[in-house]
Image (cartoon, coloured by chain):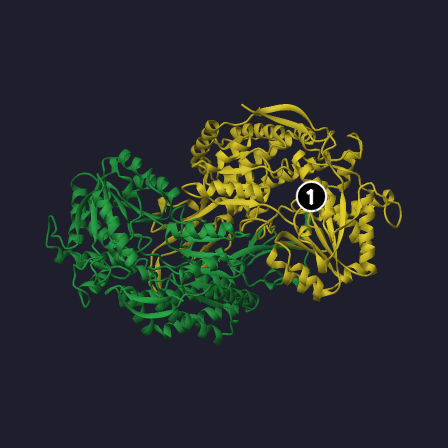
Chain colours: A green, B yellow
């Protein structure tokens, strides 16, 4: 038996052993229980599952203080951010309850029997049904919103699928506590045993993905981790859908007109965005294109000032800290990339960093919080800095220093015309590259070399549309979300959100954030010439309380 | 250079060399052309692409006589069936034109900026956009409806994606002719060069799937073929979506009440359904569960009479004929499976087969044609028999006989309580197994051992709901379509159709038939805080001619 340690990233010390790693036999038991729960969970109906989700949200809210305290101790993300993330998580559960009430997600479609240009057509009725038990892999960087009670779990339960979560080793105590809270609430709400399960340990995760009862996987993590799980899935007799949210560079393009209008503002906001949450967001902007010339220079200087004034930031775990140290060392040593600022250096020009940072970061946080329904990503970067500088090991204690896991915010510059490949790969943590471009041809050529991302951002001048339009045309094939005059590090949970993108951003055509995330855990079924008694009620003729398509036409709710 | 032969399956002789196998360099050229066509094809807009699809349908209709003649010569499917399939194909193109006009497929969603329980939310607008160039693999058994001008091509073009088709080696002349017709029509309709491409040869298919410009694959074929292509995809630096329609057993359950009411009818109809198109449908019912006792006996005898009266049927190609001969030999030699009837034998009881067959088959065809908008699968089975018995090599010329590719319709029986694994695997061609069950426990236990399928069918008694309801509950997790009192071999093209199912039926949660097949070739994009000028028109505030969800509520078309 191997114990699962809960480690304080601020000290690097093991605080407790949370559990034992889940054995293969235990994984089997949990998956069987999930399979048994599938039919009764679906039978709760849309209203019953909506009530279940609301109960889970209420229970999580009731446990807020304890959850935030343990999560902060395990992640170092700070109480402000974690309170915001908990609010995001309960909001998400409640939003999926409203998705169930709305019912449009079922894509209910009725074609009555009739003549067609092809001859007679039978009565056909289609809607989406739950895919079956789902494995959810928690992410290190969101101990709540993308972990046990997060978006994958919320959308799978809403769909009617039991969930077995693989707890992330970075926050096992938080995972276990939240799981216990949810299980108790689910029981009280009348959900069947087996609706929720949890496993700890890497082998347990592999066992989970290989288990015949598991019908789909929701994953947020690295490309390498995804490739390993995909290999297991390909070896199944019945490969299953895998929804991976993986790696993202999130380029930002600043037009000359934008730089002319607000160079200092953009520089400071960009620095705040790429260091928000210690740069540990999948939407962290890792590369910005800035025009050459004095406006661009001013932008870079503002970013440098902000970064030089920042302090080392606590990172989530030893692996991320080590990988960040390696990654920044590689970047700094790459010909064509020039380290221009890192935390603790004095700013090359301009007012003292200490006077500048709080204001510009605060503004960026407010703008990022225009993704305000995404408080997990929208809290002030200041709270992270504070977590390091106040009350925790001496600033300057760096990753590998033995007293905790820290990373130094770092900014590098490059020339767009000669952009090293290293600058186009995600480096998780508070580091980014600014690439200077000289004219549109230079910019477009560099953009063509980028991998796809979850997001792409355009900073444009007042009323500017020509270049932004051309940039949109070029960026759209390689991004899931395009942001104008904002920053990508806020991801609102809403009906119109899309958190996805072509490989390596994800491996799917679906989102992991927002209401349509539910589509991942559903599959269509068509009933042909079924007597009304055998149809789900949503497909019967007289049913009219959800949006449906009937005989080819959308019918609104009367 | 290797020539691509067009072979007459009725004689086994090569009639012509259609083309040379496409080289790797030529595949590259075609894929680059497709990539270049992507933006202008999208820019045609929904109306422009609707007009394009209608032009393609018109051109195909104009070439009907020549297309059907060549397709018949290459496939042996007969003019009746092929005329029906061509009508299905043009109907399909026109239906996707109406999908474009409707616009609901875009899933257009607008969330205006505003306050939420999470704080301020930015303006978010989401819709689906074309995924990029698509590779389509033609199927052997539908030279039109699932090949060059088929459902994959129609839905991909509708989505706005250029298509490069891998022509199936079983009907290269048909593929090339139809391709030439479509390319000419597309040009006249204003589609950009590169909208359509075609490749011949197995290596060209592999090159196609590996090409960086290809963003998704539509495939109809064997599980082994799919696994091979998936391996290529996994080796890409950027794995892409693969939509495979693979293998299906399509179980049929006859309740005791159904057998009591209409044993002879069901027996004859079942025989007609599994021999329709020489059993070369993905929806062929390969296994029927029939109660023990006199009613069930009468059903089996009726099926035996029909099969004994049938004649050897022409199969599509040498590979299918050889595989069919191996498959039926394996089934016949498997302990627990009893061959009870094959074509040309006299019926064990009842009236002479020759008197019985045409009537019962005709009825089955009419019922199957309740999937009447699916004429490809809904033509009279008689036409296939006729194709063999009239004008072609002597009946009795079997597969491997040297004078063409033929298969003998075969029926086997088994006991549900001791059902061999071999009876649960698809065998392509006119063969099926009837498994006798003794009570519900016996039936349910056998059903639990089946792989998933595209379809499952329930034959029920008049007004019967209890057992059919329980069967629906048990069959639904393993099927994409559930048919009541009909047969699976008609697949209507409509809004509510679903042609899919869990592995091994497909590897996706999407359909390859019906209007929602378009979803495969689309991906979501969200615009955040975009000025109206930079939004697609379907996402602008004032646009109201398609169904959209605005601020969480479905808005019908005014």
Image height of A482 relative to A544, above or below: above
- Subunit under mark 1: B
Instruction: Identify the residue under disc 1.
Output: B327
**Residue sitting farthest toward the right:** B351
Viewer-proximal residue among A491 and B553: A491
> Looking at the image, which residue is at 74% across and 49% down?
B367
Tag 1, which secondary structure? helix
Image height of A392 relative to B184, above or below: below
Q: Looking at the picture, how far across and down is residue A440, in whole percent?
A: 27, 35
Viewer-proximal residue among A419 and A253: A419
Q: Is residue A510 visible?
A: no
In this rendering, would B51 be left or right of A293? right
Q: Quadrant of residue B436?
A: bottom right
Viewer-proximal residue among A532 and B231: B231
Q: Is residue A187 visible?
A: yes
> Looking at the image, which residue is at 48% across and 74% down?
A187
Total of numbered circles in the picture?
A: 1
Viewer-proximal residue among B362 and B337: B337
Q: Looking at the picture, how far across and down is residue A111, in whole percent?
A: 63, 53
Image height of B315 relative to B451, above or below: above
Q: Looking at the picture, how far across and down is residue B18, in whole percent?
A: 60, 25
Q: Looking at the picture, how far across and down is residue B20, in whole percent?
A: 55, 24
Label 1: few (<14), some (14–19) or many (≥20) C-alpha neighbours in 10 Å: some
**Residue sitting farthest toward the front:** A1
């Amino acid at each position: 038996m191997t114990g699962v340690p809960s480690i304080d990233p601020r000290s690097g010390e093991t605080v407790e052993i949370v559990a034992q790693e889940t054995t293969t036999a235990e994984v089997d038991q949990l998956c069987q229980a999930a399979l048994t729960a599938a039919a009764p969970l679906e039978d709760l109906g849309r209203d019953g599952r909506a009530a279940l989700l609301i109960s889970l949200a209420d229970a999580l809210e009731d446990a807020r203080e304890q959850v935030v305290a343990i999560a902060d101790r395990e992640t170092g993300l700070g109480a402000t951010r974690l309170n915001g993330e908990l609010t995001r998580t309960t909001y998400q559960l409640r939003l999926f309850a409203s998705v169930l009430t709305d019912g449009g997600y079922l894509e209910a479609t009725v074609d009555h029997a009739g003549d067609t240009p092809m001859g007679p057509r039978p009565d056909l009725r289609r809607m989406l049904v739950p895919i079956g038990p789902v494995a959810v892999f928690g992410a290190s960087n969101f101990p709540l919103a993308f972990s046990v009670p997060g978006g994958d779990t919320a959308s799978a339960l809403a769909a009617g699928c039991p969930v077995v979560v693989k707890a992330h080793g970075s926050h096992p105590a938080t995972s276990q506590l939240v799981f216990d809270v949810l299980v108790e609430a689910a029981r009280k709400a009348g959900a069947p045993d087996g609706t929720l399960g949890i496993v700890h340990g890497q082998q347990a995760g592999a066992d989970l993905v290989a288990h015949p009862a598991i019908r789909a996987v929701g994953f947020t993590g690295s490309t390498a981790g995804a490739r390993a799980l995909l290999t297991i899935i390909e070896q199944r007799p019945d490969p299953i859908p895998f929804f991976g949210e993986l790696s993202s560079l999130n380029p930002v393009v600043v037009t000359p007109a934008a730089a002319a209008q607000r160079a200092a503002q953009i520089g400071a906001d960009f620095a705040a965005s790429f260091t928000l949450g210690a740069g540990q967001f999948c939407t962290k902007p890792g590369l910005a294109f800035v025009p050459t010339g004095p406006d661009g220079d001013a932008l870079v200087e503002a970013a440098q000032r902000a970064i030089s004034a920042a302090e080392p930031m606590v990172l989530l775990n030893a692996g991320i800290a080590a990988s960040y140290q390696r990654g920044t060392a590689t970047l700094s040593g790459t010909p064509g990339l020039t380290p221009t600022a890192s935390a603790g250096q004095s700013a090359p020009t301009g007012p003292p960093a200490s006077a500048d940072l709080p204001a510009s970061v605060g503004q960026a946080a407010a703008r990022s919080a225009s993704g305000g329904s995404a408080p997990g990503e929208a809290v002030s970067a200041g709270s992270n800095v504070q977590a390091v500088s106040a009350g925790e090991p001496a600033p300057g204690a760096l990753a590998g220093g033995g007293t905790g896991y820290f990373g130094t915010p770092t900014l590098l510059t490059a020339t767009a015309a000669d952009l090293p490949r290293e600058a186009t790969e995600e480096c998780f943590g508070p580091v980014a590259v600014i690439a200077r471009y000289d004219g549109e041809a230079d910019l477009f050529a560099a953009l063509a070399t980028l991998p796809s991302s979850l997001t792409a951002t355009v900073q444009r001048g007042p009323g500017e549309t020509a270049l932004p339009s051309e940039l949109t045309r070029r960026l759209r094939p390689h991004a899931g979300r395009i942001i104008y005059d904002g920053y990508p590090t806020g991801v609102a949970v809403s009906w119109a959100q899309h958190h996805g993108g072509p490989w390596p951003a994800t491996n799917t055509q679906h989102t992991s954030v927002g209401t349509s995330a539910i589509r991942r855990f559903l599959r269509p079924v068509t009933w042909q010439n079924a007597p009304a008694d055998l149809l789900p009620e949503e497909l019967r003729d007289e049913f009219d309380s959800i949006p449906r398509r009937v005989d080819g036409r959308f019918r609104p709710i009367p």
